[in-house]
Amino acid sequence: MNYKETLFFIGKCLTINHEEKNNIIIENQLKTKEIDWEAVVKLSTAHFVFPALYCNLKKANFLDYVPEELVNYMVRITDLNRERNQQIIEQAKEINELLLSNNITPIFLKGTGNLLEGLYEDIGERMVGDIDFIFSKEEYIKAIKLITDFGYTRVHKDAYDPISFKHYPRLQKKNRIAAVEIHKELLIEKYADEFNYSLIKKDAQNINNVNVMSFENQIALSIIAKQINDDGIYYKNIALRNAYDVFLLSKKLNSNIIFNNLSKLKLPLNFFLASCFIVFNKTTSLQYKSTKEIENYLSTFNKQLNDSKVRNKNYKRTERKLFLKARLKIIYKSIFDKTHRNWLIKRTLDKNWQQEKLKQLGFKKN
């Protein structure tokens, strides 16, 4: 199985309990016993959907087609992830109670929000990193003080965390499993006026005394996290963890996904939606309205899937361009903004940072 075949196999596996045609295709494929399980494990792990793959195969009663040793490994990893997620849920509820008791109402985002609202049949499916939540800018400073007074401290103890437009530096607490990101924005400055707290607050849902976004806004943020915040629009690739969330959330809507309330973000969101439609084998809940721009995007997307040389070349070229763009942006901001200027000076004078850069540039061995 090449990269594209493996990606599409995993994609269909993630939908087999909702899409009958994919259920039939995957069972027939499994019966051939020609699955490259090593490639499947490697790719599903890289995309953070390994537990979700197991949960879907189990629910569809397809585990008999999977090598026993691999099933045992899947069970172990999913059990560990389920245990971690249960601790994340308890930690998030603790933070929620702390903030609510001080008249601050957080809206939980991304994976943690999905867990709290019960999006997954098995909480072991979703691999979650940080606990992310947002509230109004007026509550932002007060919330930071409350949470730090509650025992949370910065993950990186030095004073050189990049200055973030979106959130406060990551926080952690002893005997708590996940780091915390306190957001005041959801997106980089270019798009912050279009998708922000004011927008998502209008139709936020309260589920078991916890606030999460509406399903449509959850879909938008799941895509935005990849396309905008992780530069997926430039790399023209897909993240199956985000795509799987989009697929599950699309089943909660009574109509097709339409980003009518967005302007600048509409095209990047539809690029990803179209990619999901292809990878999940044209599932109806992910149908998109075709345009010339979308078809051009999909053309590049497919070329990269079909040819590893093209994929690697485009990735490296894009990575270099974005790296240069980010560094120029830092320099530009440092010229006109004192806070950024002071941060840059302290960062470049730090000996540990200097040593690390010498290693990255090849002037010093690791």
Image (tube, rainbow, N blue to C red):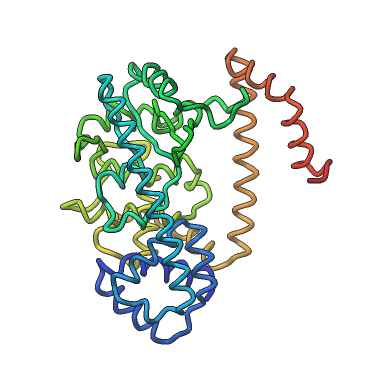
| Position in image of residue 199 (x %, y %) | 27, 30
The residue at the far front in this view is 175
Q: Is residue 261 left or right of residue 125?
A: left
Q: Where, by quadrant of the figure, is residue 88 drawn? A: top left
Q: Where, by quadrant of the figure, is residue 38 drawn? A: bottom right
Q: Is residue 320 above or below residue 283?
A: above
Q: Where, by quadrant of the figure, is residue 259 drawn? A: top left
Of the pair 67 and 114, the residue shown nearer to us: 67
Of the pair 1 and 301, the residue shown nearer to us: 1
Q: Is residue 300 above or below residue 73?
A: above
Q: Is residue 284 left or right of residue 14?
A: left
Of the pair 339 and 149, the residue shown nearer to us: 149
The residue at the far top in this view is 338
* Residue at screen point 38% across, 61% down: 52
Q: Is residue 286 above or below residue 270?
A: below
* Residue at screen point 60% across, 65% down: 308
* Residue at screen point 31% across, 42% down: 113
| Position in image of residue 18 (x %, y %) | 25, 66
* Residue 287 visible in the displayed image: no
Q: Is residue 80 above or below residue 10?
A: above
Count of labels shown? 0
| Position in image of residue 63 (x %, y %) | 37, 76
* Residue 120 visible in the displayed image: yes
The residue at the far bottom in this view is 32
